[in-house]
Amino acid sequence: MASMTPELAEAQAVIAEAAAQNKLAQHEHLVTELRSIRTQIRSHIGEIGRLRDIVLAHDGKTSLIRTKITELARLVSISLNQKPEIADVLPNDAEAVEWERNHRRLVASHDAAVKELQKHGTADPERIQAVKLNHDLQQLRYSEQSLLAKLQGKKLGKFDDKGLSGVA
């Protein structure tokens, strides 16, 4: 075989240097991508926590309002059972008037609690946003794992009909 000429040796050295620089640039690019993904992961985790707190606070208040409604409904029922017999015959009797006033107050409180629950609404927008962010977070974590595998020189798995396989 012919010996290597100085020009050929120089060309191979230039090619080797270019390949090394390209590999370094690719590595730096992957590290930059990984930093970006890590920043996004932290941001998503923080936002999911914030939304979780909103949803839990909302659900707690909703539960309190529903408990209040249930208790008021129970008191209205008890009040109806305690209606004085005289109230139908003598509605202006002092006992009948007192019962009627108290009963109307209970019914009004119950109605106000129902309106409060309707006004309170639901935390669905926050719930939906949290679910979406959680889905995005899972994709970011998968991307993070893929980048780490590339940086560590591991072969990535392939998707087939059985899912992910061949992860080294």
Image: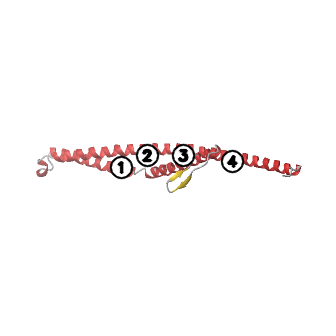
Q: Residue 125's spot in the image, x, y percent?
A: 46, 52
Looking at the picture, which amino acid does disc 3 mark?
His
Question: Which residue is disc 2 drawn over?
Answer: 55
Question: Which residue is disc 4 drawn over?
Answer: 29
Callout 4 secondary element: helix
Q: Is residue 32 left or right of residue 10?
A: left
Q: Is residue 115 left or right of residue 134?
A: left
Other-residue count near label 2 (Cα within 10 Å), few / some / many at <14 / 14–19 / ≥20 = some
Q: Residue 139's spot in the image, x, y percent?
A: 54, 50
Question: Which residue is disc 3 drawn over?
Answer: 44
Looking at the picture, which amino acid does disc 1 mark?
Leu
Q: Nearer the viewer, mark 2 or mark 3?
A: 3
Callout 1 secondary element: helix
Q: Nearer the viewer, mark 1 or mark 2?
A: 2
Q: Nearer the viewer, residue 167 or 77?
A: 167
Q: Residue 12's spot in the image, x, y percent?
A: 82, 50
Q: Nearer the viewer, residue 134 or 161?
A: 161
Question: Which residue is disc 1 drawn over?
Answer: 117
- Which residue appears farthest toward the bottom when viewing the image? 161
Residue contact between numbered discs 2 and 3, judged by CB atoms under 8 Å: no
